[in-house]
Image (cartoon, coloured by chain):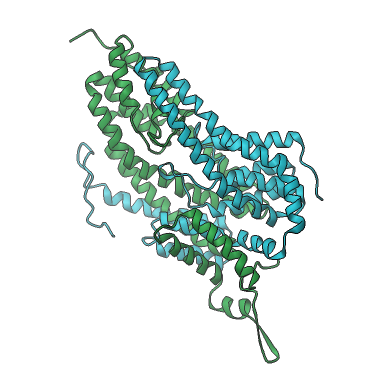
């Protein structure tokens, strides 16, 4: 059921990609840059929500643990999900193909994010100059102008690859061998483990190892859905919070400034 | 003593608060990171305090233009304390403001990034992805709602911090620390459940012994431990990430290439639904 992508769809998807990129700089919180959200919205635009969700969900698992710590640039799987979903729907090649497209796209696009953030240095220097001259409104304008490189870093690649990508993709697909297509399909299934592993590096997994096993046990043997597992986790977290809060309550000084030296600080 | 300095009102704080709300990391750059967002948001309050003394205003704005980086969710608290101090002491607080900003941004980044950058995305992302893999949008919508709730809650931070001034730093630090730790526990438990639920990779290899064919996956691996292959793959990725010169992008590339190789060799595969 291969079809063509309409101009309106290309425009909407380009706007979506731009908004996903700008969310971090403006409200820093609508989570639009998360692949599952971007894929979900791209799916709605393409009239195939399910494909968008599945592509987004798979990519989401790959970046689960990759946060924007200290401003680190991370694979841009939001744009990846948008391009992958769109080309997946129009090529009619299905979800595995969509995922296969989105992974390399996301990995390559992160370079443009880095470039945009370098360009922003220029504006911070301009703002310095405007502060020295007491032109504070121009200082604010410099801050707003950084949205241009941020926005273009996504709008250009997404717009261009959607405008020209379809014919290129069709050409590639006609000649793509099984080892590549099957391999990409397997990669879609395997890559979430990288996201999970990254996450385990950030979470205090050694300290909470028993709870990791509890979660595994509930899912693998009792077949409890994720929501149910989250509820068990919430209960455990509430009990734990109560316990540690009671423990800390005594040694706090009057001004609350001194951090109490906990002797129970496990490595 | 010169003439009375103007004092900040609730309306001033509200204005700065709203300005920060929509310019959280505006102008983020590699050199000084969140400095432009901070200076842009706080400017109306600075103008109110030092508007009639251009040199003082410039001096204090220079301080606010210095390197700054922390969690955008917790930044309003720091800005509230910053404003409380300046409201009390004016330009004499210059060094104190610089010191408090640099002193707080590290710990606040550590707590805020792990809570809002890792733990909540882990829990909500796991749920959303788990449901999304089945084509169900509820998880994604739920995450959007949680994100909106956090943005709304953020609005109360700065007025609260301004009112409490310096004294909230100690008490709030403790509470956030405990909250982060408990939420991490939840995150770890969810991840434990996530591995067998969403990673569907099997060994399609079938061993032929005489007349008998043995399905490695169902007759051997599943008997030892369900989801053994996913667990082994997570362990491999975990180990690789701990190596030197490794980062997430490189590990993803390596896994991508290995997937193509292992698929061709028929060692790993995707279960046919």
Percent position of residue B236, x then y: 48, 66
Q: Which of A58 and B76 is in front in this view?
A: A58
Question: What residue appears at the point 38 percent right and 20 percent down from the top-left corner?
Answer: A129
Determine whether, in the image, residue B39 is placed left or right of residue B251: left
Which residue lies most toward the bottom here?
A: B210
Chain B shade in the render:
green
Residue A238 against residue B96 in the figure, above or below: below
Percent position of residue B150, x then y: 48, 37
Percent position of residue B205, x then y: 64, 77
Rendering quarter of residue B94: top left
Determine whether, in the image, residue B62 is placed left or right of residue B20: left
Percent position of residue A224, x then y: 57, 62
Q: Nearer the viewer, residue B127 or A189?
A: A189
Rendering quarter of residue B14: top left
Residue A114 against residue B57 in the figure, above or below: below
Q: How many numbered marks does the figure carry?
A: 0
Question: What residue appears at the point 63 percent right and 73 percent down from the top-left corner?
Answer: B265
Q: Nearer the viewer, residue B42 or A119?
A: A119
Look at the image and tell me in which quarter the C terminus of chain A lies: bottom left
Residue A221 visible within the image = no
The chain coloured cyan is A
């Amino acid at each position: 059921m291969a079809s063509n992508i309409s101009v309106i769809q290309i425009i909407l998807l380009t706007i979506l990609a731009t908004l996903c990129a700008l969310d971090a700089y403006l409200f820093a919180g609508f989570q639009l840059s998360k692949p599952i959200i971007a894929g979900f919205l791209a799916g709605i635009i393409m009239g195939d929500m399910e494909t968008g969700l599945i592509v987004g969900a798979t990519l989401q698992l790959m970046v689960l643990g990759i946060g924007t710590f200290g401003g680190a640039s991370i694979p841009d799987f939001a744009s990846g999900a948008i391009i992958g979903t769109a080309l997946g729907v129009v090529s009619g090649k299905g979800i595995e193909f969509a995922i296969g497209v989105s992974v390399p796209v996301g990995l390559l696009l992160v370079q443009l994010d880095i470039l945009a953030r370098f360009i922003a240095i220029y504006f911070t220097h301009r703002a310095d100059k405007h502060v020295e001259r007491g032109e504070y409104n121009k200082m604010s304008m410099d801050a707003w102008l950084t949205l241009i490189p941020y926005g273009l870093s996504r709008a250009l690649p997404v717009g261009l690859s959607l405008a020209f990508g379809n014919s290129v993709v069709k050409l590639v697909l006609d000649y793509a061998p099984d080892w590549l297509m099957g391999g990409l399909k397997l990669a879609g299934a395997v890559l979430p483990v990288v996201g999970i592993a990254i996450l385990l590096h950030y979470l205090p997994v050694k300290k909470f190892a028993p709870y990791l096993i509890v979660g595994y046990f509930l899912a693998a043997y009792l077949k409890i859905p994720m929501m149910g597992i989250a509820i068990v986790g919430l209960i455990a977290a509430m009990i734990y919070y109560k316990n540690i809060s009671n423990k800390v309550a005594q040694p706090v000084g009057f001004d609350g400034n001194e951090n109490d030296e906990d002797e129970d600080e496990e490595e | 003593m010169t003439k009375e300095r103007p004092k900040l009102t609730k309306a001033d704080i509200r204005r700065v608060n709203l300005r920060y709300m929509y310019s959280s990391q505006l102008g983020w750059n590699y050199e000084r990171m969140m400095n432009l967002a901070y200076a842009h948001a706080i400017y109306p309050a600075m103008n109110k305090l030092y508007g009639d003394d251009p040199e003082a205003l410039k001096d204090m704005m220079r301080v606010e233009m210095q390197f700054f980086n922390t969690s955008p969710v917790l930044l309003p608290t720091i800005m509230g304390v910053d404003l409380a101090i300046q409201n009390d002491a004016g330009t004499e607080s210059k060094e104190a403001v610089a010191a408090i900003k640099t002193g707080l941004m590290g710990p606040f980044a550590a707590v805020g990034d792990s809570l809002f950058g890792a733990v909540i995305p882990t829990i909500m992302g796991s749920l959303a992805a788990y449901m999304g893999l089945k084509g169900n949008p509820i998880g994604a919508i739920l995450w959007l709602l949680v994100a909106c709730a956090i943005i709304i809650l953020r609005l109360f931070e700065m007025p609260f911090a301004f009112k409490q001034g310096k004294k909230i730093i100690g008490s709030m630090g403790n509470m956030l620390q405990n909250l982060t730790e408990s939420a991490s526990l939840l995150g770890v438990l969810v991840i434990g459940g996530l591995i067998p639920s969403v990673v569907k990779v099997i060994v399609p290899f079938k061993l032929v012994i005489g007349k008998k064919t043995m399905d490695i996956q169902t007759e051997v691996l599943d008997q030892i431990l369900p989801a053994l292959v996913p667990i082994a793959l997570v362990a491999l990725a975990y180990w690789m990430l701990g190596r030197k010169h490794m980062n997430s992008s490189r590990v993803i590339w390596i896994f991508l290439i290995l997937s193509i190789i292992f698929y061709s060799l028929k060692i790993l595969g995707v279960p046919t639904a």
